[in-house]
Image (cartoon, rainbow, N blue to C red):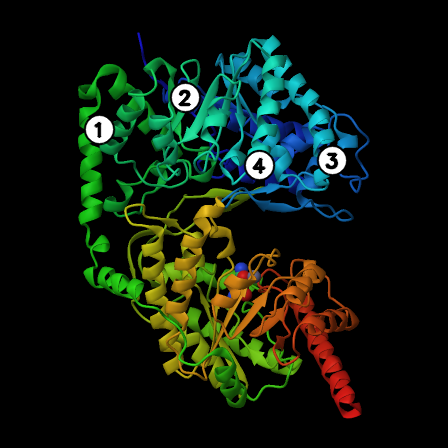
Amino acid sequence: MDVLKSSNIGYPRIGEDREWKRTLEAYWAGTLNETEFMAQLEAIRLGNLQKQRDQGIDIIPVNDFTLYDQMLDMSVMFGLVPERYSAYKGGTVPLSVYYSMARGNKDEVASEMTKWFNTNYHYIVPELKESQLTLTENKPLAAYREAKEKLGIDTKPVIVGPYTFISLSKGYEKSDLPAIILSLLPLYTKILRELEQEGVKWVQIDEPSLVSSLSKDEMKTVTYLYEKLNEAVPNLNIMLQTYFDAVEHYQEVIDLPVQGIGLDLVHDKGKNLSNLQTVGFPQDKILGAGVIDGKNIWLSDLTKKIKLVESITKHVAEDRIWLQPSCSLLHVPVTVRNETELASEVKEALAFADEKLEEITLLVRGNNEGPESIEEKVTANKAAWQTLNNSKARNHKDVQSAVEQAKQQSHGRTLPFKQRYQKQQAYFNLPFLPTTTIGSFPQTAEVKQARGKFKRGEWTADQYEAFVNEEIGRWIDIQEEIGLDVLVHGEFERTDMVEFFGHKLGGFVFLEKGWVQSYGSRCVKPPVIYGDVHFIDPMTVKESVYAQALTKKTVKGMLTGPVTILNWSFVRDDISRENICYQLALALKQEVEALESAGIKMIQVDEPALREGLPLKKSDRDEYLNWAVHSFLISTSSVEDTTQIHTHMCYCDFNSFMDVISSLDADVISIETSRSHGELASAFEEKTYEKGIGLGVYDIHSPRVPAVEEMVDMIERGIKVLDKDQFWINPDCGLKTRGVPETVASLKNMVEAATVVRNKLLVQQEND
Ligand code: GLN
Ligand code: ZN
């Protein structure tokens, strides 16, 4: 009989209650030995497989589990251990070395970590050295055997494909690429041969890089790679899995000599589907149809999904279709079952990993056994959607019309930068090379304890507020004593720069167990934007005003920008991201205005996540940047000429981003650059940037106290390419993760460095 199958392409590893995280951390802390550690992880791993089997998933992945990160697993499988990890002597990579690469140890720094495509998952960047390439073990084979022996499940091992692996690696020259490909291919071949000999039927090879803007020539490399792999394992079926967007070269991809192609039919902007309909899909291949959103937390609209499946089955025979999530379920929490406090209108409309798998099996059943078989579920699904869509939260007509209006208008400051900056300089009367910080001061154990007491109800709101005020007061004194020019209140009242605002704005809810892995054992619980976002009451005015009353110096107000709140939340999917961003922008505009009327005339609106929201395809980027920049302008441009808007971003690669930064039209921007100072300075050699700018003069990610001379050097390098009158002096990011002593010592040195440079420049001027 012609029937659809259900398949999964990756399951969250962290467990319903973050058991995985706790197990890792217990091992690192030495409370578990290696044997106990491995046994506990095995239990979690097998539990995850059993769950998928019990759900009725036909094709279950293995080797999606990891002891830290799937890219790191590939690196160690290939023997790619950088030489600085001196304990490694070749062969299978011991756990201690594995974790040194992931986390560093007391003598050796960790490997670089970066974002996995457009998700909030971070992987360890492989350092690819052709000379080191050797197969140290076959992890997917071990995972396959384990599932077969322990549970009797015939699974589908998953690995990261060679093209994506190479694309995401660093440490080689473009010209070395052919040689690298030639030395990597035999290793992939060996892995696959061993799987083939074992009797594995399907292997999933992940190639998400095929959705990026790769060239035709690069696509030729992909074809070459898969020709070789297919030749090597004629009896092993390869499911070439793509996700996060439409494949860039559809025809070439479907022509690859593999037995299955996995396509994302949710985040493809309709392109994969329309290619499927117009170009077709080969008769001899399986289609992995990614119909359920693997990245968002909402229930699917089953009626729409049934239609989607119908339109696919018109073009591909049913026995050649696997229904699956659009990407690994790694990016969503495990199950809605454990959310006990949510309003039912929200809870009923959520679907995390387990519920998404259920949706897949429902769609499969509806197709194979007829629509009546799932009628009840479809009716319930419709009702859940209707309830949420009709809820008050989603029907703030005033918010919606304000968005429509704001979209039509252009927003900008009244005066061009140069003129208003002059006015601001007169108003604030700061020395040149003014010193400041990025906002947060150390969140010490006491700060966290106080928040805990307040949350548990042991402290009243007044008690908590008194505590926060005391901290603010203490740090105003410390900042004055250090001699900083522009002060901040320290952000002691905030756990997290997005969550804090979510709690104060309308339209948000919070999950109890909605954790997703961010990197290694670190999990985050993003707020959920489920309704129209709106301003309720001032959110930051009280603390800023309190701080300002304690000092004659300027206190800088501190907000998180609309784009960052959007990018670091789970967002509703019934309206566009653009519109959600505008809603946020309008709400934050009210906060900026509230601060201004309360006498806070310098306001920083942080946008550290603006860059990371950039779409994977070059052709989609302008659209995103247009509404992202417009949103920032909406929030920040209604202020008086003398009110100074700051912004902050943290990442290194600014060279290609200077125009965007400039179009935000912030009077001052501070950026994280201390780890790539030289590179950034070169960006300014080519392009002129005229606004205020603080290139972080020291790296806050390490407890090390930088010496005065080091920072003098940094500043002098900066003012070689930038005017001294536009240059600000600050650390490269917030200080909340640092200890107090090192923070105070570092800032003292920073202020001292500013003074040294100022004096040198003054002497020079006199001599000129
Ligand atoms: N103002 C924030 C802080 O200092 C900025 C944090 C960030 O850039 N991620 O903590
Ligand atoms: Zn930062």
Circle 2 packing at 10 Å, graded few (<14), some (14-19), many (20+), is many
209 to the left or right of 313: right
For image coordinates 67% across by 23% down, the residue present is 185
Image side of residue 443 versus residue 174, left or right: left
| Residue identifier under label 4 | 23
Q: CA distance from mark 1 to mark 4?
A: 37 Å
What amino acid is found at the position of numbered circle 4 in the picture? Thr
How far apart are labels 2 and 3 at the CA level? 34 Å
Q: Which residue is mark 3?
A: 176
Looking at the rendered structure, the secondary structure element under dot 1 is helix
Q: Earlier in the sequence, mark 2 or mark 3?
A: 3
The residue at label 3 has a CB less than 8 Å from ligand 2 = no
Contact check, label 3 and label 4, Cβ < 8 Å: no
Cα distance in 3D space between marks 2 and 4: 37 Å
Which residue is the extreme one toward the bottom? 766
Q: Estimate the x, y position of residue 675 in percent, counting from the top left.
A: 69, 58
Disc 4 residue crowd, few under 14, some 14–19, many 20+, Cα 10 Å: many
- Asked if the beta carbon under badge 4 is closer than 8 A to the nearest atom of ligand 1, the reply is no
Mark on residue 377? Answer: 1
In the rendered image, the quadrant that contains the C terminus is bottom right
Separation (CA) of disc 3 from disc 4:
40 Å
- Residue pointed to by mark 2: 287
Secondary structure under the numbered disc 4 in the rendered image: helix
- The disc labelled 3 sits on which kind of residue? Asp
Q: In 3D space, how far apart are the residues under numbered discs 1 and 2 (Cα atoms)? A: 26 Å
Which one is in front in this view, the residue at disc 1 or the one at disc 2?
2
